Structure formats: C-alpha cells, structure tokens
Image (spheres, rainbow, N blue to C red):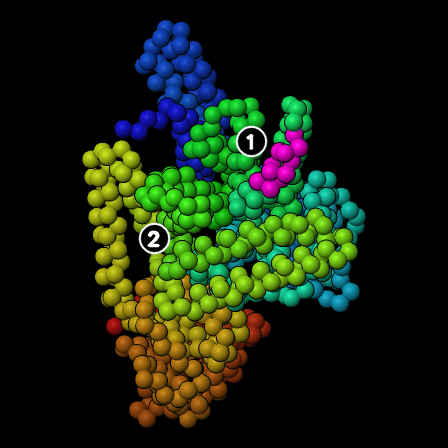
C-alpha cells in the first residue's frame, strides 16, 4: 500500500488546496476561521507534545489529523485575506458613482493592436462628497492615438470617468472574461481615451519589478532589431521573453492544433535550459567552497531575474521555485523527494496567491511535471536503447507522452481538442526550440557587439522559419486534430482519478485500485451516456450575441444550422469564440452555414413578406424577422400569430400597429441594432408593457420548448 509518511508536503498541500477551493467556491466569509485556526494549532502542538512525551501512537496520529485540519483552515483564511473585494474600502463597496480617480500602474503593460491593457491600483476616488480613499484594481483599456506615449509601470494616473463592472459572457459557454479578471482581483474596467487621463508622476511600487520591466523593454528592442520579420519576431519575443501580445491568430491556432502551444509560453523548459547553461559554464570556474557559493547565489539570482523579466507567470514561478529548492538541496547535499518538492512549490506559490490555483498555466505546468516525474522513468524502462542518440530520442518520446497523459483531462476541459500528431510535433518543436532559446540568450547577451547581433539574428530567423514551417505542415495533415470534446467538471475529475488509480495499480498491484478504476470508468461512461441521450433529444432555437451582427442557431439533435449575416460567415472568428463553444457543449457534429440574406433555406422553411421581411417556421416555432417597415395585412381580419418577433438593423415600426396586427409571446432585438435604438425601444416597451428581450444586453436568447 502507499506509504504516506515520506510525503509530508503532499499531505499538507492537498489539505491547503481543499481549504482554498472551499473558500473560493462558497464565496462566504467564515468569521471564526482565525479563531478556529488558533484553536486547532494549539491543539496540534499539545497533542504532538503529549504523544512524543508518552510515546503514544494514538496521540501522535490525532495530532497529525488536527494538524491537517489546521492547514485546511489556513487555506480558507489565507484566501479570505487575499480576496481584495473583502476589504471594507474596496472600490466595489462605494455607493456613490466616481467622477475621477487616481492610482498607480502596478503591473506589466500589455500592448494590443488598438489599445494598451493597463492594470491600475486605485487609491482615491472623487465623488459628489469629495475625494475618498479606496482600494482595488481596475483594468484600463487605453486607446492608441497619435502622439500617445505608452503608459509604463509606476505611472501615477488621474482618470476621468466611472469604472464599470465587467459583464458576464453574453453567449452560452463562452469565455468568462469577468471571472478571469476576478481571479486576478480585478473587478472593474474602463475604456479610456488619451483625453481622459493625465500622468501625475512616477512612483513604481517595486524598484525590482521596475528594473526588470525596463530590462525587458531593452531586450525586446534587441530582438526587434535583429529579427525583423513580424511573425518570427512575435514568436521570438513569446518564446524568449514571454511577450505573447504580438502573436497573430493563425500562428497561435497552428501551435494549439498541433499540441505545441506550450513552446510559445515561457515555462520550466526555458528556466531549465538557462540554469543548465549557466551551471555548465560557471561550474567549471568554481573551485573553492567560496567560489561555489558565489556561483550558487548567482544562479539563483539569474533565474529569479529571468522570472521577473518574463512577467512572473505561474508556470515560470513554478519552475524557478522548484529549481531553487533543488539547488538548495543539492548545495547542502540533502536528498530530494520530487513529489515533496513539487508539493512544497505549489504550497509556497498558493500562500503568495491562492488564485494561482485557478490559473490554467499553473494547473497545466504542475500536471505536466507530475506526469513526467511519475511516468517517464517507468516508460523509459519499457525500451532499452543502447546508443546515445536513440536514448535521447526515447527520453523525449517518454517525456512527451507522460506530459500529454497528465495534462489530457485539463486539455479536454479547457481546449476541447486532442492533437493526433502531438508526439511528432513536440519532438521536433521542443528540440528546435532549445536551439532557438540558446541562440536567443546569446543574442540578448552579445547583440550589442557589432556584427555578432546580425549573425545570431539570421540564425534565429532561420531556425524560426524551420519550426514554423514544420508546425504548419503538421497542422495540415489529415485528421490532425479531434475537436469538439466537451467534458463536465465531474468527468474531468473522474478522468484524472482514472489516470492516478491506473498508475497506482501498475506500481503497487493492489486489487483495491483495480476496483477504483472500474468504478471511475462506470461513472464516466454513465455520465457520458446520459449526456448523449439528452443531446439527441434537444431542439433549440438560439439568437446569439455578436458585435453589430446577427446569428440564429437552429439545433435539432446533433445537427445545427447557423443563419448569420454575411460578415459573420466570411470571417469565422465570431463563430469560433461566441458560438462554437456552445455547440461543442451540445455535441453538435453536423453544421450548415446559411446567410440571412438568402431567400431560400433547405433546413428552415422561410417565406418573404411584401416588404422584404422574413417569416420562418421551424419545429412548430413561428418567427417574424423585421428589417424593413412592414404594412401588416390579414385576409381573415384576425391578428397574425407568431411566437417571436425579431427586430434587426434599427427597423422603424409602430408598436401600436404591431400589437394590433400581430400576436406574439415576446419581442426580441438582436445585436445588429444600435445602442440608441435599443434604449428607445426599451422605454417604449416598458410604457406599453410589451415583453422585450435585448440580446446585446441580456445575452443570447434560447428557446428550448420547441415542439
């Protein structure tokens, strides 16, 4: 059976994580958490002292249980304290609207095509009662205009306007930007023009971070100078410096579809290569104990500086903390348990920021390392390779397979896809990216030497062209990717449990693990079967929320027809980000795209009115779509019967005439109508007590009670 005694930090971290998750998802303040923590801590020390003095195994075991309970409570308490919205002076609790506010830019400024993303730590708000001290962070989208200097870390800004609470996703299963910001302790945002703010001064909260950002900009300038091709420069900055804002959509999609997107993110691989290179060079120079200590301290300083330069991402912090612990253990000649080191690293990072636990990069990074530690040594033993090159290739294969297995549940959950050729793509991409990284490090170090920078830049550009070309070729191979995988949270946990129990069964050969494997398979299959049955019976009509466009989804079983404006069908970005996640969730595997401008539709019977408007009849559902002013006529003199009337493109109409001529359940207005039109319509409908659903404000409209 598993012996838990050597894995102290594993036990502590599991309980700590449980406390964090309980606090985050319950979202309730436990007033007595600090008192309970104090009580359980005192009880732990008392039981531990008595158990050691009396030699009682029972008391020692009880002390261990109480200690784990203390760690669980510590997880709850630290999450409460790190949740900024719990502070009484937080911006969320301000009752009066803000007219002005001041704050300091306290993080890396991210450049976007049309604006800058600036995280502002606000300290004062001016309302009708004057200036009030506040706390909190605001995401500013500063619009780019001619003559605007890029905001920088440490700038003290005076902003005019009222920060808004981000909206939840307006389409079903779409990316939740509001939640994403909340996990970074950001609960407000504002789109700002240059005329709306003024720089009052420069007060960087952290001189170390300010220096690292300044260094990062200088290093970025070197890459931009010597790797001039835009696509290669974007990849070089992402790969070496962690700046992914310049990557275009196509190249990101290609690396994602081949399972090599991790190459574009600074991770443990980058830190390991930097550490190994410096350790190899400086290790040869260190002879005396004092010199070895100096090299050891320099290596730690170099790794942490690199972590700051690459924006302190969760995956980089994981790697740097792990290497720090391993280096300390090696320097002092202490044996290291990789599971304890991995757990201790997670524990330390989560004490610093409990919300790292919900960061996708954090989860994938730890899952990949855990998979490599658990499975790679055992996979290596399956095949014995005598020659050096074959051994290195097999090590790469086993590491890639181990990491892919460990991250598979998370990849299914977040990205809904599985790259078929991940092994081939990763073997090539990781190998060549190592050379690119080393060339990049040399370029950043010696690029100031005349002539050397151009040579290294040419080599780096050449290698990047090869890597991009191969990745793009692999992406085009037949059946390169399986898309549309949709798992519930419970299924992800069951899949992870299946992998863990399978590993334990292969290691310990205990029947209890085989029983657990069987139960997880049964539970997973049962949930999947129930989901498939429901999907085959589904009949939905959905009006999606898009920017300035309309899209109607007609879903029957696992087949769907999308009626959308021609702009949506020409550029599938809107579909990919706003509609496809919902259709993956519904299990849609047959899709038909039809323009709303076409007069005929083989799936949804469509009729044209004399004014050019459309009547659609589908599964007993009657829909009137108004784009032009309509003169309503009825041969029988009775009102026309419709389930829904959809208004588009700011159509002019009289609600009195519409009500007199048409009977309907609800009036809908889609995203093609302007804001002023929707506001006027809302006021008119409120006066006449007409039910109105505004898709742009209330989110996608879904009708599930279709006959």
Badge 2 is on which residue?
488
Number of marks drawn: 2
Where in the figure is residue 359, as x and y percent of width and height? 49, 47
Mark 1 vs mark 2: in front: 1
Q: Residue at x 22, y 39 (%)?
A: 514
Image: 582 above or below 266: below
Q: Is the magenta region chiefly helix, strand or loop?
A: helix
Badge 1 is on which residue?
327
Image: 70 above or below 300: above
Please tell me how crowded label 1 is: few (under 14), some (14-19), or many (20+) other residues with Cα within 10 Å: some
Residue 377 in sight here: yes
Q: Residue at x 23, y 57 (%)?
A: 529
Where in the figure is residue 574, as x and y percent of width and height? 48, 70
Where in the figure is residue 636, as x and y percent of width and height? 30, 91
Image: 178 above or below 45: below
Q: Is residue 38 left or right of residue 477?
A: right
Q: Is residue 123 left or right of residue 514?
A: right
- The magenta region covers 276-286
């Amino acid at each position: 059976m598993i012996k838990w005694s050597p894995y102290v930090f594993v036990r502590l971290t599991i309980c700590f994580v449980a406390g964090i998750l309980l606090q985050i998802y319950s979202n309730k303040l436990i007033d007595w958490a600090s008192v309970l923590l104090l009580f359980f801590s005192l009880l732990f020390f008392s039981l531990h002292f008595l158990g050691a003095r009396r030699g009682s195994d029972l008391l020692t075991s009880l002390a261990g249980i109480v200690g784990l309970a203390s760690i669980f409570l510590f997880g709850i308490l630290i999450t409460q304290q790190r949740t900024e919205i719990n502070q009484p002076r937080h911006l969320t609790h301000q009752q009066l609207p803000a007219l002005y506010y001041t704050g300091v830019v306290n993080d890396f400024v991210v450049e976007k095509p049309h604006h800058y993303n600036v995280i502002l730590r606000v300290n004062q708000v001016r309302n009708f009662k004057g200036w009030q001290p506040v706390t909190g962070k605001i995401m500013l989208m500063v619009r780019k205009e001619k003559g605007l200097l890029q905001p920088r870390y440490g700038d003290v800004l005076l902003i005019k306007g009222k920060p808004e609470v981000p909206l939840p996703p307006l389409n079903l299963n779409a990316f939740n930007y509001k939640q994403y910001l909340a996990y970074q302790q950001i609960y407000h945002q504002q789109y700002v023009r240059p005329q709306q703010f003024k720089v009052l001064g420069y007060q960087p909260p952290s001189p170390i971070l300010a220096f690292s950002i300044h260094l990062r900009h200088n290093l970025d300038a070197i890459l931009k100078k010597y790797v001039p091709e835009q696509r290669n420069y974007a990849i070089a900055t992402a790969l070496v410096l962690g700046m992914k804002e310049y990557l275009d959509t196509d190249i990101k999609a290609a690396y994602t579809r081949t399972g090599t997107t991790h190459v574009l993110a600074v991770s443990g691989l980058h830190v390991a290569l930097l550490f190994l290179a410096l350790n190899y060079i400086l290790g040869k120079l260190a002879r005396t104990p004092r010199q070895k200590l100096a090299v050891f301290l320099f290596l730690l300083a170099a790794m942490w500086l690199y972590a700051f330069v690459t924006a302190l991402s969760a995956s980089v912090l994981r790697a740097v903390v792990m290497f720090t612990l391993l280096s300390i253990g090696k320097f002092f000649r202490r044996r290291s348990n990789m599971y304890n080191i991995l757990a201790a690293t997670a524990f330390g990072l989560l004490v610093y920021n409990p919300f790292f636990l919900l960061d996708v990069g954090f989860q994938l990074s730890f899952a990949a390392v855990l998979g490599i530690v658990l499975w790679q040594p055992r996979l290596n033993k399956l095949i014995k390779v005598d020659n050096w090159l074959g051994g290195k290739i097999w090590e790469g294969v086993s590491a890639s397979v181990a990491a892919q297995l460990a991250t598979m549940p998370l990849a299914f959950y977040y990205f809904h896809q599985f790259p078929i050729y991940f092994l081939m793509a990763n073997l090539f991409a990781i190998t060549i990216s190592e050379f690119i990284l080393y060339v990049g490090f040399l370029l950043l170090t010696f690029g100031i030497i005349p002539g050397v920078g151009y040579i290294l830049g040419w080599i780096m550009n050449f290698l990047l062209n090869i890597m991009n070309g191969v990745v793009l070729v692999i992406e085009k191979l037949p059946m390169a990717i399986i898309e549309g995988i949709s798992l519930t949270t419970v299924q992800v946990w069951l899949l992870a449990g299946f992998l863990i129990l399978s590993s334990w069964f292969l290691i310990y050969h205990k029947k209890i693990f085989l029983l657990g494997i069987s139960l997880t398979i049964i539970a997973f299959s049962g949930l999947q079967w129930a989901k498939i049955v429901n999907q085959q019976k589904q009949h939905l009509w959905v009006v999606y929320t898009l920017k300035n466009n309309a899209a109607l989804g007609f879903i029957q079983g696992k087949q769907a027809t999308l009626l959308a404006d021609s702009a949506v069908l020409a550029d599938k970005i809107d579909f990919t980000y706003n509609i496809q996640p919902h259709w993956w969730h519904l299990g849609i595997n047959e899709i038909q795209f039809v323009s709303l401008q076409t007069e005929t539709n083989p799936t949804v019977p469509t009729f044209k009115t004399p004014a050019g408007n459309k009547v659609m009849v589908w599964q007993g559902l009657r829909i009137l779509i108004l784009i032009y002013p309509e003169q309503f006529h009825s041969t029988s003199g009775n009102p026309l019967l419709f389930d829904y009337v959809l208004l588009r493109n700011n159509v002019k109409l009289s609600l009195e005439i519409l009500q007199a001529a048409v009977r309907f359940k609800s009036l809908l207005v889609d995203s093609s109508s302007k804001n002023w039109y929707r506001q006027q319509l809302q006021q008119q409908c409120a006066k006449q007590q007409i039910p109105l659903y505004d898709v742009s404000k209330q989110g996608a409209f879904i009708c599930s009670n279709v006959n």
